[in-house]
Image: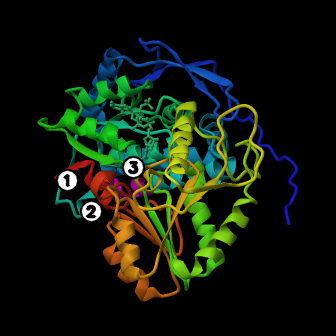
Amino acid sequence: MAFEYAPAPESRSVVDLRSSYGLFVNGEFVDGSGHAFKSVSPATEEVLAEMAEATADDVDKAVAAARRAYTRTWSKMSGAERAKYLYRIARIIQERSRELAVLESLDNGKPIRESRDVDVPLVAAYFFYYAGWADKLHHSGFGADPQPHGVAGQIIPWNFPLLMLAWKIAPALACGNTVVLKPAETTSLTALLFAEICQQADLPSGVVNIVTGAGETGQALVAHPGIDKVAFTGSTEVGKAIARTVAGTSKSVTLELGGKAANIVFDDAPLDQAVEGIVNGIFFNQGHVCCAGSRLLVQESVYDEVLMRLKRRMATLRIGDPLDKNTDVGAINSAEQLARIRELSEVGEAEGAERWSAPCKLPDRGFWFAPTVFTGVTQAHRIAREEIFGPVLSVLTFRTPAEAIEKANNTPYGLSAGVWTDKGSRILWMADRLRAGVVWANTFNRFDPTSPFGGYKESGYGREGGRHGLEAYLAH
Ligand code: NDP
């Protein structure tokens, strides 16, 4: 039975959108020297604001500000004092959570239900968590007196703009580093609201600097000789380019790159819960998730049953206005990303897989893609090998646990995996053999600040989150 839902839009009035934004350097908003560019709402194509572009010269000023703040203030401050600032930032994030959630959904296209209940609470949680470490670093297992690197250059993608900022900035500051961060071109607005929060928290000038712009701004940041540590989340292709740029320098690097995770359902799994996990695994955040469960591996004996239940569940997903509190699946982040999802889906059909999309009416304006599942997929298909980064699921089957492992590990990536089964021993057997940084058991896409996250193989190196996440920001 289908339910009719009346619209329940969250009000935009809580957000004070400016017509244009500058860069955040040395504690102040300043003009950029490059060509201004527009930030567009992916749900409506409405121009939200004009953003400044940071040139190499602007990046240089931001790095100089971060260096001054590092030498004169931040590296001299005790861990307990740094912690006070981080706790203050965490509390302001909680206080302004509605504003942050609405702005994130406007700019990124993700449903308000997710930005309000997942992204923003996690952002606060990461700041609280790392605030707790700031005065205990000598107990973190990285030496008796671990020291910060200095100035960190951080580049983040558009899928979780504020959450990726928190993953980068919170541990860096807790360890005593200062930062220059570049958000993605299409989703810079919440990073600039975070800059306001830094002002509100009286964070010393230059400890956090935000430079907006596209790939060239990122390149200038990575190549800058004043950067001691580079942290990047994004595509494997750009990650490789960054690794080449820093090769032969003394810069330390962590890379969190793509994924093509297997979500493995055994015949003894509770199927309704597994179907919820499959849906959450691939349709959460429109599938713009590096650890998305984009390859479903189903045991052959329950294949028909799982597919029937999955399609029935997909038909109930509500797609549309990201600010509507009833929305399950929001807008695709950009026209470019939509084109990539369409292209790979067409390749899937051309290669012989069978395509089924949830019956839903997509809005006329904006960037949209219906939740889609491909069956009859083989391991050779591009849709089984490449990261689509959209609401598209490829389904394969297996007969034995050994076959499931072989198929799950048959990928150049190794970021995450999911296992659905009633048997604890089987979960442990599988977890031992899956070449993935995170293995979820009877759940998927769960994040927690105490838990490390990162990949094997082409999914990158280094860990973010937990005690392990401190290591990236300490020279020990
Ligand atoms: P990118 O890797 O290009 O973007 C990630 C970040 O790096 C952005 O801030 C980007 O800036 C910046 N950047 C781009 N080029 C350079 C460079 N040469 N040097 C330094 N920084 C750079 O991802 P895309 O947005 O182009 O997405 C392409 C594909 O990558 C997606 O379809 C998806 O498959 C994958 N992806 C994976 C992510 C993950 O978390 N694993 C996240 C995002 C994308 P700007 O956005 O301003 O160009």
Residue linked to disc 2 = 140
45 displayed left or right of 293: right
Rendering coords of residue 373 (x, y %):
60, 57
Q: Is mark 3 within 8 Å of ligand 1?
A: yes
Q: Is residue 417 above or below residue 287?
A: below
State which region is magenta.
129-136
Residue 24 x, y percent position in the rendering: 45, 25
**Front residue of this view, candidates 78 and 323:** 323
* Residue in the image at 42% along x and 25% along y: 214
Q: Residues within 10 Å of mark 3 (few under 14, many from 20)?
A: many
Q: Which residue is mark 1?
A: 146
- Residue 134 included in the magenta stretch of the image: yes
Q: Quadrant of the N terminus?
A: bottom right
SS of the residue at dot 2?
loop
Q: Amino acid at mark 3?
A: Gly
CB within 8 Å, label 2 to label 1: yes
Left/right of residue 236 with respect to residue 95 in the rendered view: left
Q: Which mark is residue 258?
A: 3
Residue 364 is left or right of residue 279, and the answer is right
